[in-house]
Structures are given as structure tokens and as C-alpha cells.
Amino acid sequence: MIVSMLLLFTIYIFILACGSLITTSVALERTSRVSILVFRHVSPLVVVIAKLAALIVAMLGIVAGLALETTVINILNIVPLSGLLSILGLTSLSGPQQCLVLLCVISGVAIFSMLYAAVGLFVRESAQLQYAQFPVSFVLILVFSLSYTAVLNPSSMTATIAAWFPLSAPMVESGRIISGSSSIAEGVGSAAGVFFFLITTAVLIARIIVPRTAGCYRAHNLTGPLHRRAR
């Protein structure tokens, strides 16, 4: 229960911290016309997938750093990690289960990062950043509330439903795996659903949102002073 709650709050806080940075970064590219220049030469889908891959690599780097630090602490015997893991009930997790928990954490951050990035594409001026993130943040709060209820009772029907819902699955499934309420088949199925939702979101952003945001400015930019001077 304690570890499940820690994971839930870690994912939630990490998403909140990264969401604002991602929206601001995408909005700056958007308002400075950098994204327009990029989309002229590279497919929007390639750009979106590349940004997603970079985010995943960054999170894997953080996890690798924490793993290395934990290994060093264990070798030097600074903290009795074996006893701590035993108290927390983590010693019974198999290799595949540990990988699924890690996948849940990464996918949860990736999904909402994509949504925050999509919001940034609609920002036309810096003043809009104050309220542009509200729709995604509101959904995040609802998902967190559902996940919190599910984590309190990981064997309930609510937890089972939340584990198959792509937005809440990363927050709930990790706790169900740790508590032993989830099977490998459920974990793999939930991860597949989250992966499908992630790819679908990336395709929708690249095929629908990007052409309606950066695309409309591309036409405006082609009729600007620089283009007329070049002609």
C-alpha cells in the first residue's frame, strides 16, 4: 500500500512538474515560428515521435542513474536495502513484474506529456500559457482521484476498470502489480492498451493538430515580407 501510494504521487508530481515545462517549450517553438520551419522539411509525425522518444530516453536515463546510485549504496552497505525492500514487500517481484512497473511509470508520464505538448501547439502568445494547461490539468486531477480510490483497494472492481483505462492504467497497474492483485497477462494487456493510446495520440497530433496550428501559420509566413522579397 505504501509503495503503491508513493508511486502514484511520484507519477502525479512528475507529470505536473514536466507538464508546464513541456507546454512552455512547445509554445515557444510555436510562437517563434521554429516549429513552422521544422515542419516544412520534416514530417510532423516524425517530429512528434522523435520528441516522444527523446522524453522516454530521458526518463530511462533518470531510472538508470537511480539504479546505479542504489547499486553503489548497496555495495558500500550504507543503507540496508535488502531489509528495506523486505519491509516494503518488493522482494517478491519477479523480473517481468519489475519491468512492467517501470513501463507503467514511463508510459504515464509520456501520455500526459503528449497531451501537454498538444496544448502548447494552440498557444499563440505567452499570455495564454496561464490558462492553456487547464483542460489537461483538470483531466489529470480526475484521473488522479480515480487512481487514488483504486490504489486504496487494489482488488476492487474500480481498480480493475481503472487498470484498463489508458489514462489511469499507468498509475493503478503498478500498484496492483506490487500488491499481487494483477496477473502478468493483465499487466501486458494494460501496457498494450496504453501503448496503442500513446501511438494514436501521437498520430492525431501529427495529422490533425499540427496542420491546424503550425499549418495555418505556414501559409501566412509564405506571404510575409521575406517571401515577397525573395520573389
Image (cartoon, rainbow, N blue to C red):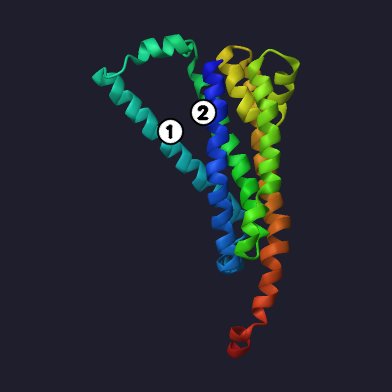
Residue occupying the point 73% across, 56% down = 208
Q: Which mark is residue 102?
A: 2
81 on left or right of 224: left
Q: Is residue 184 above or below residue 119?
A: above
Looking at numbered disc 1 in the image, what kind of residue is underneath it?
A: Val
Residue occupying the point 71% across, 69% down = 216
Can residue 166 be seen at all in this image of the molecule?
Answer: no
Please say if the residues under marks 1 and 2 sit with CB atoms less than 8 Å apart.
yes
Can residue 208 be seen at all in this image of the molecule?
Answer: yes
Expressed as whole percent of the image width and height from the top left, the position of residue 26 reads 57, 57
Looking at numbered disc 2 in the image, what kind of residue is underneath it?
A: Leu
Q: Residues within 10 Å of mark 1 (few under 14, many from 20)?
A: some
Tag 2 or tag 1, which sits nearer the N-term?
1
Q: Which mark is residue 63?
A: 1
Q: Residue 124 carries which label?
A: none
How far is disc 1 from disc 2 in space, using C-alphas? 9 Å
Q: Which of 190 and 154 is in front in this view?
A: 154
225 on left or right of 89: right
Expressed as whole percent of the image width and height from the top left, the position of residue 141 reads 67, 36
Q: Is residue 146 above or below residue 92?
A: below
Q: In this view, does 117 lie above or below 63?
A: below
Q: How crowded is mark 2: few (under 14 residues within 10 Å), some or many (20 or more)?
A: some
Q: For residue 80, which quarter of the picture? A: top left
The N terminus lies in which quarter of the figure? top right
The C terminus lies in which quarter of the figure? bottom right
